[in-house]
Image: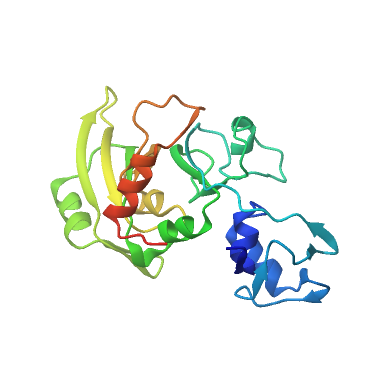
């Protein structure tokens, strides 16, 4: 079948990420057969329709859906481009043939798992709060949570900056020689810097943060700065676990 919605056709071709494509369509950047189209659901026939972005012809093809994970080091931005010239994810994934994009960001000084894919629908499913896909983090905090502090975060959550953070799952891992603590935290929310804000508010600022898993997709023993392709079994297990259908 060669007929697809405009947005999906552009995503399938690996042209850009979902957000940029939607903004581009809304802004009138795309023409189909010389007509500006602002509807992302407009049906196109990729076998014969001529599509241009800012008057530059786009060669459409349906790219194989691919899924990779990357172990982001500290001091790397989790984007493909950075106007400040800092090290970025793209610098580490030159061996990936498909045009893949990071799903869910880690801040500059955070480490760990980033999912890279050209499957825009799955990416949107993961980052959408309504789907409650859990993310697992190992975090080093200053000092140690008291039992009262831990119970409050686990049972009630917390209000920060006018919004409520839902209850967290928190497990103690170990103490350091400096009497700081490594803990494992599971959260389904994706607000910017949310865990750093939570523990700063409780008086235990984050010293290190590493994402270990997104749902059933786990970092395992992947070395820092390296990537690998997910197996079909890993992708299928994730989809089945969280009821993803496409």
Q: Position of residue 32 (x, y in %)?
A: 76, 71
Q: Residue at x 29, y 54 (%)?
A: 240
Q: Is residue 183 left or right of residue 190?
A: left
- Relative to residue 143, is residue 88 drawn left or right? right
Q: Residue at x 80, y 64 (%)?
A: 52
Q: Is residue 165 left or right of residue 126?
A: left
* Residue 190 located left or right of residue 169: right
- Observer-nearest residue: 230 or 201? 230
Q: Image height check: is 153 above or below 176?
A: below
Residue appearing at x 74%, y 64% in the figure: 48
Q: How many marks?
A: 0
Q: Is residue 164 visible?
A: yes
- Residue 54 is drawn in which quadrant? bottom right
Q: Quadrant of the C terminus?
A: bottom left
Question: Quarter of the image holding residue 50?
Answer: bottom right
List x then y, in percent, for residue 6: 64, 68
Q: Quadrant of the N terminus?
A: bottom right
The answer to whether one can see residue 215 in this image is: no
**Closer to the camera, 233 or 127?**
233
In the image, residue 177 sits, relative to residue 44, either above or below, namely above
Taking the spot 35% from the left edge, 41% from the top edge, the residue there is 234
Q: How is the image coloured?
A: rainbow
State the image coordinates of residue 193 (x, y, percent, origin top left): 45, 52
* Residue 100 sits in quarter: top right
């Amino acid at each position: 079948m060669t007929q697809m919605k405009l947005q999906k056709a552009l995503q399938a071709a690996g042209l850009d990420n979902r957000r940029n494509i939607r903004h581009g369509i809304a802004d009138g950047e795309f023409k189909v057969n010389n007509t500006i189209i602002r509807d992302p659901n407009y049906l196109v026939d990729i076998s014969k329709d001529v599509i241009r972005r800012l008057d530059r012809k786009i060669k459409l093809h349906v790219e194989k859906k691919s899924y990779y994970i990357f172990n982001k080091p500290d001091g790397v931005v989790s984007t493909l481009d950075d106007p400040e010239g800092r090290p970025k994810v793209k610098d580490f994934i030159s061996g990936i043939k498909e045009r893949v994009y990071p799903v869910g960001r880690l801040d500059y000084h955070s480490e760990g798992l980033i999912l890279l894919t050209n499957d825009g629908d799955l990416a949107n499913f993961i980052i959408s709060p309504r789907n409650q896909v859990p993310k697992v983090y190992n975090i080093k905090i200053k000092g140690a949570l008291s039992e009262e502090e831990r119970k409050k975060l686990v049972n009630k959550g917390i209000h920060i900056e006018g919004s409520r953070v839902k209850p967290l799952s928190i497990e103690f891992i170990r103490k350091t020689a400096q009497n700081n603590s490594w803990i494992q935290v599971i959260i389904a929310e994706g607000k910017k810097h949310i865990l750093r804000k939570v523990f700063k508010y409780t008086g235990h600022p984050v010293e290190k943060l590493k994402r270990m898993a997104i749902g059933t997709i786990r970092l395992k023993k992947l070395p820092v700065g390296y990537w690998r392709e997910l197996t079909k079994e890993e992708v299928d297990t994730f989809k089945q676990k969280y009821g993803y259908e496409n």
